[in-house]
Amino acid sequence: MQDKDFTGSDGSGILAIRTIAMPADTNPSGDIFGGWLMAQMDLAASNLAARLAKGRVATVAVEAMHFRAPVQVGDEVTLTATLRSTGRSSMRIHVEAWARPMREEDGTTVTDADFVFVALDETGKPRDLPD
C-alpha cells in the first residue's frame, strides 16, 4: 500500500477519531487530562497502523508531543492520522488533535505528536509489513 492511501486529499491526514471530552476525563482544575488526550491519539494512530499492517501492532514510541491549548469538558475532539514513513516492520504516524468548543463552529489545534508502531505476529514478535 502506498502512503497516499493513508492521507487526506489535502495531505492533512485521515479522520481517525471524533469524540466528546466528558467530565470524568478532567483534572481538579476542570481541564481534560493530558493523558486522556494522549490515549485518544494513540488509538487514532493505532487505527491507521493496524490497517497498514493488516493485523496486530504495538506502540513503541511517542515523540515530540506538545500541548498548545487545554481541552474543556464538552469540546468535540477530532484526531487525524498521517502516515509519515515505514520501515521493515515499523510505521511512523503523525497525529493532530483539534478541539472545537460545544457551541462554536471553529476549533483549534491542541496537540500533535509522532507515534511509532511495530507490526507483530501472533506470538507478539515483530514481523514484516505486508507489501
Image (cartoon, rainbow, N blue to C red):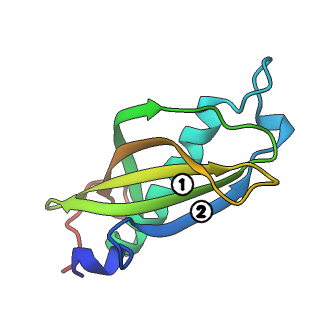
Check disc 2 and give the amino acid type: Ile
**Residue hosting label 1:** 43
Q: Are marks 2 and 1 in contact (CB under 8 Å)?
A: yes
Q: Position of residue 104 (x, y in %)?
A: 75, 55
Front-lying residue, 27 or 70: 70
- Secondary structure at badge 2 equals strand
Residue at the limit of the structure toward the right, as seen here: 23
- Disc 2 crowd rating (10 Å Cα; few below 14, some 14-19, many 20+) is some
**Residue hosting label 2:** 17
18 lies left or right of 97: right
Q: Position of residue 31 (x, y in %)?
A: 73, 28
Front-lying residue, 123 or 66: 66
Which residue is located at x 29 percent, y 54 percent?
125
Q: CA distance from mark 2 to mark 1?
A: 8 Å
Residue at the limit of the structure toward the left, as seen here: 88
User: Which corner quadrant of the image does residue 39 belong to?
Assistant: top right
Front-lying residue, 126 or 91: 91
Q: Is residue 113 above or below residue 1?
A: above
Q: Is residue 100 above or below residue 36?
A: below
56 lies left or right of 71: left
User: Which corner quadrant of the image does residue 5 belong to?
Assistant: bottom left
- Secondary structure at badge 1 equals helix
Question: Comparing marks 2 and 1, which lies closer to the viewer?
Answer: 2
Q: Quadrant of the N terminus?
A: bottom left
Check disc 1 and give the amino acid type: Leu
User: What label does residue 84 carry, if any?
Assistant: none
Q: Position of residue 37 (x, y in %)?
A: 60, 40
Q: Is residue 120 above or below residue 31?
A: below
100 lies left or right of 97: right
- Disc 1 crowd rating (10 Å Cα; few below 14, some 14-19, many 20+) is some
Which residue is located at x 64 percent, y 38 percent?
36
